[in-house]
Amino acid sequence: MSTKKNTIAVLMVLVLGMALAACNGALPAQTAAPGQQTAIAGNPGGVTVIGQGTAYGQPDQATVIVGVDTFASTGEEATTQNQATLDRVMAALDAAGIATEDIQTTNYSLYAEQIYGDNGPEGIAGYRVSNQVNVKIRDISRVGDVLAAVTEAGANAIYGVNFSVADPAALEAEARAAAMDDARKRADSLAELGGVSLGDIVVISEVVGQPVMPLGMGGGFAMEQAASAPGISPGQLSYQVQVQVTYGIGG
């Protein structure tokens, strides 16, 4: 009986030893020199910064909303007059070399204008028709001439003269490179302050900003008194890119 108990005890010790060995084998051995940081699984740490870069360029195209606003005593008369004027405006755009695909209707409205007295509405004064088209001008040097041509043809309102770059890829690349350089400088500064060294890049994410419009542009103005090509200043556009970069912490 004593021999049987001793045998069972030996077997239990062997099983316990095998279990401990299996647990030790599942955990990778980590050694670190004095003063060296050791990454913990699931929490590697790092230095995360946001870098910003900006690139500047000259716009090479413009968009503008050309409007024809007509008022008449009846809706039919207002519609007919408005369409006749718009046809002349479209002919002027064609003569100026604006392609059909670069002209798009953005607004059309027809409504009755009420007469108001002391007691409220007293009847209809007439009907107003507004027709607006968005025009893309690919030759920026001709913006003033195009506006003068549509005004002479009968357009009586101009809205939202906006400038842009047809292919912003080069400016975005320049801004991106500047953002990465800025991120590295920020990370270097933080690492030095924290007494650590930077490792490899772990994560990068990018945010591309919309181009900034030149100051003073983008409003609307009446063209009824424009007798010649208006002076247009395209100014300069800027493209901004932000990058969020995480660097590992080296030894």
Image (tube, grey):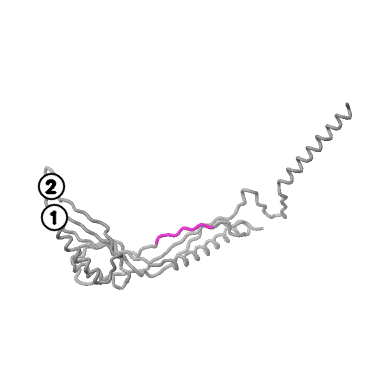
Dot 2: what SS?
strand
- Residue at 61% x, 49% y: name it: 43
| Label 1: how many Cα within 10 Å (few below 14, some 14–19, many 20+) | few
Q: Which residues are magenta?
A: 204-210
Left or right, 55 with reference to 37: left
Q: Quadrant of residue 55?
A: bottom left
In magenta segment, residue 209: yes
Left or right, 162 with reference to 47: left
In-front residue for pair 125/166: 166
Percent position of residue 182, x then y: 52, 63
| Label 2: how many Cα within 10 Å (few below 14, some 14–19, many 20+) | few
Residue of label 1: 76
In-front residue for pair 244/205: 205
- Residue at 60% x, 58% y: name it: 191
Location of residue 17 with respect to 161 vertically, above or below: above
In-front residue for pair 135/58: 135
Q: Residue furthest front?
A: 100
Q: Tell me, for residue 116, which label it has, or none.
A: 2
- Whole-angstrom CA distance, mark 2 to mark 1, is 23 Å
Percent position of residue 229, x then y: 23, 72
Percent position of residue 233, x then y: 31, 69
